[in-house]
Structure formats: structure tokens, C-alpha cells
């Protein structure tokens, strides 16, 4: 049976309490055989905690409802987030962390909620749009019909112009710095 994110958190808190009690027992135990068994138990509890932290596929827990104000994650919400990242923030192939940062910025939420949204995005096909450790948001937006080809082309041009302007600014700064250094040397 699948557990909600809330149940998963309560289970983790219970495991944490048991782990803390085992660590105290380990510190107070003098018998080496019992100490070894307690250490094995601690290792097992650590594995359980790691499985709770790891991805949804490994734990079998699905985030159906987010705890952020009881708001369910809809495809329309995902569409807004993806359009924001592509058309406003000009992100073509961000990493998972960059996507999470933008979700937090856009939704004004915490990391846990952002992770739930990201998982939903992966379920909708973002997993198939990976380029190494990055995700091709243009491909994902095209696949899900979140943006038109014209909008994506405009966003690419806008991103190109931004990169070009940044490059020019850096070249100007570099030439000014070079002049200052040359004056200091002379």
C-alpha cells in the first residue's frame, strides 16, 4: 500500500526516534557481542532512512496530493511553471537543482513541495527529455504542447541576445581591467 508524503514523514520520525535510542544503547553497552548486534540494527535503520530519502521509485511512495495548502498538482500548474522557465527565465536545459530553484521562486514554496512538483513533471515525460544531468525543457514543452514553435523560437532568440549582451559586457570589463593593469605596470 502506498503511503502519502505525510505518512512517510511520520514513519521517518518514528525510525529516527528508534535510531536515537539504539545509538544511546550502543554507547552504554559494554558487551562486545551485544554492541555488534546494536551496530547492525543501527545500520539497518540507516538503510531505511536512506530509502525514505531516495526517489519515489525506490520507496514506492507517490505524491498524489501536495501538502502545500492542500493544493493538488495539476498539469495546468506544471504548464505554467514550464512556460515561466522557458519564456521568462530563458531556461532551455536546466539541471534538476535549477528547475527546483525556479519552482520555489515561481510557487513561493519549500523544497519538499518543489520536489513533489518535479516528480510530477517527470511522470509527465520530463524523464525522457534528459541530456546528461540536464533536462531539455523545450523538448518537454513541445511534447506536452505547453508552448508553440513560434514561442520557443522567440525564447531562443531572446536567450541568444541575452548571452550575446553578457559576452559584450564581459569583454568591455576585461578590456577596462586590462587597461588598468597596463597603466599600473607602466
Image: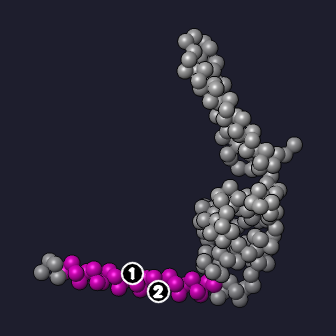
Q: Residue at 58% across / 21% down in the picture?
A: 26
Residue 46 drawn above or below residue 111: above
**Residue behind mark 1:** 170
Question: Where is 31 relative to 56, above or below?
Answer: above
Residue labelled with disc 2: 165
Q: Position of residue 83 (x, y in %)?
A: 70, 78
Q: Main secondary structure of the magenta part?
A: helix
In the image, which residues are magenta? 155-182
For residue 94, what is the image quadrant? bottom right
Q: Image point 59% across, 87% down: which residue?
A: 157
The C terminus lies in quadrant: bottom left
Nearer to us in this view, 81 or 149: 81
Which mark sits nearer the N-terminus, 2 or 1?
A: 2
Per the model, the C-alpha gap separating discs 2 and 1 is 9 Å
Foreground pick, 166 / 153: 166
Which residue is pictured at 68% across the width and 55% down the height?
112
User: Is residue 127 magenta-colored?
Assistant: no
Residue 138 seen in the figure: no
Q: Residue furthest right?
A: 1
Quarter placement of the N terminus: top right
Tag 1's secondary structure?
helix
Mark carried by residue 136: none
165 relative position to 181: left or right: right
Determine if the magenta segment contains residue 178. yes
When asked about the image quadrant of residue 110, the answer is: bottom right
State left or right for residue 72 relative to residue 175: right
Secondary element at image label 2 = helix
Circle 1 Cα neighbour tier, 10 Å, few/some/many (<14 / 14–19 / ≥20): few
Q: Residue furthest front?
A: 69
Foreground: 72 or 128? 72
Give the image quarter of residue 105.
bottom right
Amino acid at each position: 500500500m502506498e503511503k502519502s508524503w505525510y505518512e512517510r514523514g511520520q514513519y521517518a520520525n518514528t525510525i529516527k526516534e528508534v535510531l536515537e535510542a539504539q545509538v544511546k544503547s550502543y554507547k552504554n553497552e559494554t558487551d562486545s557481542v551485544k554492541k555488534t548486534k546494536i551496530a547492525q540494527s543501527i545500520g539497518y535503520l540507516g538503510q531505511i532512512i536512506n530509502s525514505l530519502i531516495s526517489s519515489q521509485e525506490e520507496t514506492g511512495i507517490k505524491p498524489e496530493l501536495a501538502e502545500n495548502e492542500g493544493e493538488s498538482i495539476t498539469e495546468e500548474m506544471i504548464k505554467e511553471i514550464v512556460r515561466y522557465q522557458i519564456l521568462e527565465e530563458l531556461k532551455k536545459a536546466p539541471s534538476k537543482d535549477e528547475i527546483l530553484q525556479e519552482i520555489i521562486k515561481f510557487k513561493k514554496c519549500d523544497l519538499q513541495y518543489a520536489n513533489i512538483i518535479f516528480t510530477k513533471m517527470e511522470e509527465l515525460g520530463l524523464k525522457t527529455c534528459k541530456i546528461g544531468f540536464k533536462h531539455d525543457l523545450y523538448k518537454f514543452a513541445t511534447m506536452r504542447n505547453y508552448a508553440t514553435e513560434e514561442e520557443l523560437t522567440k525564447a531562443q532568440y531572446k536567450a541568444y541576445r541575452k548571452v550575446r549582451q553578457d559576452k559584450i559586457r564581459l569583454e568591455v570589463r576585461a578590456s577596462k581591467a586590462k587597461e588598468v593593469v597596463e597603466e599600473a605596470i607602466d
